[in-house]
Amino acid sequence: MSLTEARFHDLVDTTQQALEDIFDESDLDIDLESSAGVLTVKFENGTQLIFSRQEPLRQLWLAARSGGIHFDYDEESGKWQCDKSEELLGEMLTRLVQQQAGVELDFDEI
């Protein structure tokens, strides 16, 4: 079953707000920019994470130093899941932030 457009936008908005909250509460020196449904996280070392919505596919896309990753929403778990590896967004973000910024943040709620 495919997500409705409204539910998809609600899920992405909720996810991006949760991400902003986690980054805001961290002690990292980062810049957060949210514009037109795109959330950009810029780390002190110049690397970035960019979260965007791909409406036609009902996917959340993440651009990281390691490449682009696409996530589908899994209704059963209530989490975003990578369409290739099935890794959860929160698990992947913990690893990516560690790789890109050298710190460990807790993304379990994502």
Image (tube, grey):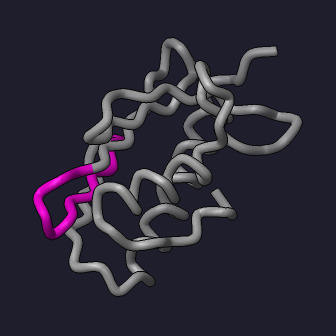
Q: Quadrant of the C terminus?
A: bottom right
Using residue 69 as the reference point, say whether residue 64 is left or right of it. left
| Residue positioned 30% across, 48% down in the render | 49
Write the start and end of the magenta stretch as one range: 37-48
Residue 10 in the image: state x and y as whole percent.
Answer: 61, 44
| Residue positioned 68% across, 63% down in the render | 109
Which sits in the foreground, 23 or 37? 23
The residue positioned farthest toward the right in the image shown: 76
Q: Is residue 30 above or below residue 73?
A: below
| Residue positioned 50% across, 72% down in the render | 105
Residue 79 in the image: state x and y as whole percent.
Answer: 72, 44
The residue positioned farthest toward the left in the image shown: 46
Name the image quarter holding residue 54: top left
Residue 17 in the image: state x and y as whole percent.
Answer: 49, 61
Q: Quadrant of the N terminus?
A: top right
Marks counted in the figure total 0
Using residue 31 as the reference point, say whether residue 83 is left or right of it. right
Residue 30 in the image: state x and y as whole percent.
Answer: 23, 71
Q: Is residue 51 above or below residue 17?
A: above
Is 39 part of what is drawn in magenta?
yes
Using residue 80 as the reference point, say whether residue 22 is left or right of it. left
Q: Is residue 105 above or below residue 63?
A: below
| Residue positioned 74% across, 16% down in the render | 2
Which sits in the foreground, 30 or 85? 85
Name the image quarter holding residue 71: top right
Using residue 69 as the reference point, say whether residue 72 is left or right of it. right
Which sits in the foreground, 55 or 97? 97
